[in-house]
């Protein structure tokens, strides 16, 4: 009888321990779940950077379901203005904050997540594949107006520019126009729209981020230098910029976690290259806000 009592007591003790352990594990799991980073991030600005951030955000949210990320275009100027006034968490930009009027760069923190090359593109019937930098300048300042003057088709050149506030436009004009004003022409506010217009408009010319160039348009070489990642990396190709993700002060919580992901090997070694950008780690030169290029 005494033996049965001891066994019953041991069984009861074992059951109690199991319940206690289960409660402890449940409490631990709840604590872990509640400590998972959550939040909402809105990133606005550069349409050149937009495809990369959108794809990275989709991949990131698969493992961070409590973080919601919305990515929008609007141009670099819009991104910088909205992150400065606090209406968005991230301002995407092709230019340094110091290069934009009305922006106090000291209040923003720069996170360089990629490099983008930009190239002049023409409608494929223009019959031109290479120009000199001076000829390109003359096209965009209205001095050359027919493709036959460059060895191409007898066809009027239709210039398509980017809208004011576009970082792509600022980068292109800084590298090509040397302070001169561009000819008045139609303006578009996104790389995607420009790509469609150039591909369907005979005689059209504009410029695009490498990530938007496809076989529907002809990307021009300049001074016999082709627009390639390798030529950007050592500055043989002059038209390029960093892709910046600006935050107002140091990023925190969900925003910090996402920006760290943008700089991770998963993005820098694979996604950046897969989507037509260049990793900052692959650059052999560096550029400052004044446009000065030096060896790394």
Image (spheres, rainbow, N blue to C red):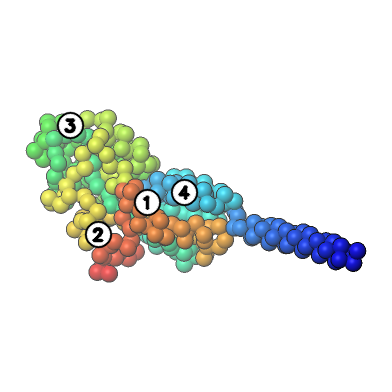
**Mark 2 or 1 closer to N-term?**
2
Q: CA distance from mark 3 to mark 2?
A: 30 Å
Residue 236 x, y percent position in the rendering = 19, 58
Q: Residue furthest right?
A: 1
Mark linked to residue 271: 1
* Residue drawn where x is 78% and y is 62% of the image: 14
Residue 84 x, y percent position in the rendering = 51, 58
Q: Secondary structure at mark 3?
A: helix
Is residue 124 visible in the rendered image? The answer is: yes
183 and 86: which is toward the camera: 86
Mark linked to residue 233: 2
* Residue drawn where x is 35% and y is 37% of the image: 193
Q: Secondary structure at mark 1?
A: helix
Mark linked to residue 59: 4
The label nearer to you, 2 versus 4, is 4
**Mark 2 or 4 closer to N-term?**
4
Q: CA distance from mark 4 to mark 1?
A: 10 Å
Q: Residue furthest left?
A: 151
Q: CA distance from mark 1 to mark 3?
A: 33 Å
Mark linked to residue 125: 3
- The 10 Å Cα crowd at callout 4, few under 14, some 14 to 19, many 20 or more, is some
Dots 4 and 1: beta carbons under 8 Å? yes
Dots 2 and 1: beta carbons under 8 Å? no
Image side of residue 57 versus residue 296, left or right = right
**Mark 4 or 3 closer to N-term?**
4
């Amino acid at each position: 009888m005494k033996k049965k009592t001891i066994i019953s007591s041991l069984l009861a003790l074992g059951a109690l321990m199991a319940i206690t352990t289960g409660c402890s594990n449940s409490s631990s799991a709840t604590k872990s779940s509640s400590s998972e980073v959550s939040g909402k991030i809105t990133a606005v600005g550069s349409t050149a950077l937009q495809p990369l951030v959108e794809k990275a955000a989709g991949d990131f949210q698969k493992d961070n379901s409590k973080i919601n990320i919305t990515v929008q275009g609007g141009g670099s100027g819009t991104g910088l203005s909205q992150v400065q006034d606090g209406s968005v968490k991230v301002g995407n930009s092709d230019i340094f904050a110091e290069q934009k009027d009305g922006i106090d760069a000291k209040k923003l923190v720069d996170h360089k997540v990629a490099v983008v090359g930009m190239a002049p593109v023409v409608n494929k019937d223009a019959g031109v594949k290479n120009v000199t930098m001076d000829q390109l300048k003359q096209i965009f300042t209205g001095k050359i107006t027919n493709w036959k003057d460059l060895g191409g088709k007898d066809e009027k050149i239709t210039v398509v520019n980017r809208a004011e506030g576009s970082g792509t436009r600022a980068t292109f004009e800084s590298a090509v126009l040397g302070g001169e004003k561009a000819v008045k022409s139609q303006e578009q506010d996104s790389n995607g729209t420009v790509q469609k217009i150039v591909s369907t408009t005979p005689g059209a010319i504009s410029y695009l981020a490498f990530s938007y160039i496809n076989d529907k348009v002809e990307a021009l070489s300049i001074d016999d230098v082709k627009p390639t990642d390798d030529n950007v990396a050592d500055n043989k190709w002059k038209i390029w910029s960093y892709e910046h993700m600006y935050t107002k002060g140091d990023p925190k919580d969900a925003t910090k976690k996402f920006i760290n992901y943008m700089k991770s090997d998963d993005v820098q070694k694979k996604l950046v290259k897969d989507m037509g950008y260049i990793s900052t780690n692959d650059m052999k030169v560096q550029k400052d806000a004044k446009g000065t290029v030096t060896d790394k």
